[in-house]
Image (cartoon, rainbow, N blue to C red):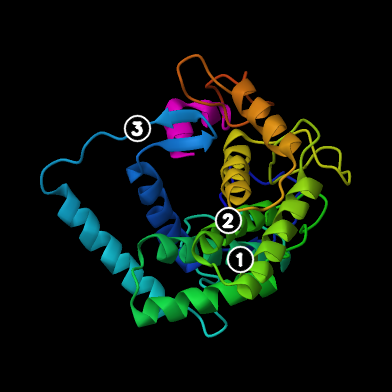
Amino acid sequence: MRSGYPAPVNAPPLPTHVPRCARLAAGLCLLLFLLSPAAVLSAGEVVATPKPARPGLDAKIDAGIRAGVAHLVKTQRKDGSWGGPAPNLHVDIFAPKPGSNRAFTVGASALALSALLEVGGDGEAVRTAIRKGTEYLISRHGVRRQRADTMYNVWAHMYALEAFARVLAREKRPEPRKRVLKAAEGCVSWLERMEFVEGGWGYFNFGIKTRDPGPGSTSFTSASGVIALEMAKRQGVKVPGKLIKKANRLIRRCAIPGGSFAYSFRTRMWAGIGSNGNINFTKGSLAR
């Protein structure tokens, strides 16, 4: 959901803003990911194991999570979504309207729903929020490509697919499960359509503007897609194996000897010089 490349010089001034709840929901999901027994990119590939928490840290983490859950329940919109345009960045990002706003809202809503499913508990208010959030995603997940050079909708489909996988892990009733499965398979279909020619996914296509985008897939967008597809597959969603295989290959090709990952395969040889030269610095890789 982030914009890593600056807008091209001739890009029209079409600014918008990232939804309010996106950072909080993303932070909760990232925290849960890092606190899990192992962070896994794909089946059998363990990439990190967290160290034991420091004394007193667990209580602070629990308090932070409870506050986050309360905020998400309080700020959910009537239609079941979260987020909206808000001036929370120091600069505007290149995001053509109205498709970008739709993609960001679906993506932020999916992250918020995933956070509630993971740590929200079983209170009545949380159950209601989960039900409304699920219904929103089922009805609104089909975000289309914004235009030939902008594909923020990949984030919407990846995060929605993760959320659907979490819902499926809970939902055992046949009819509701069938609806969620259908929506999840719709996200997989969109990811097939949005796959870049070299494998994996990106969100900008400022070069040759074709139906099948690329080259330009990024390591972190592709990793997000792999995680979502693996989660969905484990819940019975039909996932073409080649999607995961090609994305994993792209991610490995972006690996840097020091242990981090380049922003993308195209930029893997960029040196730390100039306005975009620091794009592959290790701290940037860790943030991604």
The range drawn in magenta is 275-288
Judged from the image, the secondary structure of the residue bearing numbered disc 3 is loop
Number of marks in the rendered image: 3
Residue 79, percent across and down?
A: 57, 82
Say which label, 1 or 3, has the lower sequence index: 3
Judged from the image, the secondary structure of the residue bearing numbered disc 1 is helix
- Amino acid bearing label 2: Tyr
Q: Nearer the viewer, residue 70 or 100?
A: 70
Q: Which residue is mark 3?
A: 49
Say which label, 2 or 3, has the lower sequence index: 3
Q: Which residue is mark 2?
A: 159
Residue in the picture at 47% in, 65% down: 112
Q: Is residue 264 left or right of residue 24?
A: right
- Amino acid bearing label 3: Thr
User: What is the spatial separation of the Cα atoms under label 1 and label 3, in whole angstroms?
Assistant: 30 Å
- Amino acid bearing label 1: Val
Q: Which mark is residue 106?
A: 1
In this rendering, the answer to whether 14 lies above or below 30 is: below
Q: Magenta segment: does it hold 87?
A: no
| Mark 3 nearby-residue class (10 Å; few <14, some 14–19, many ≥20) | few
Camera sees residue 133: yes
Outermost right residue: 210
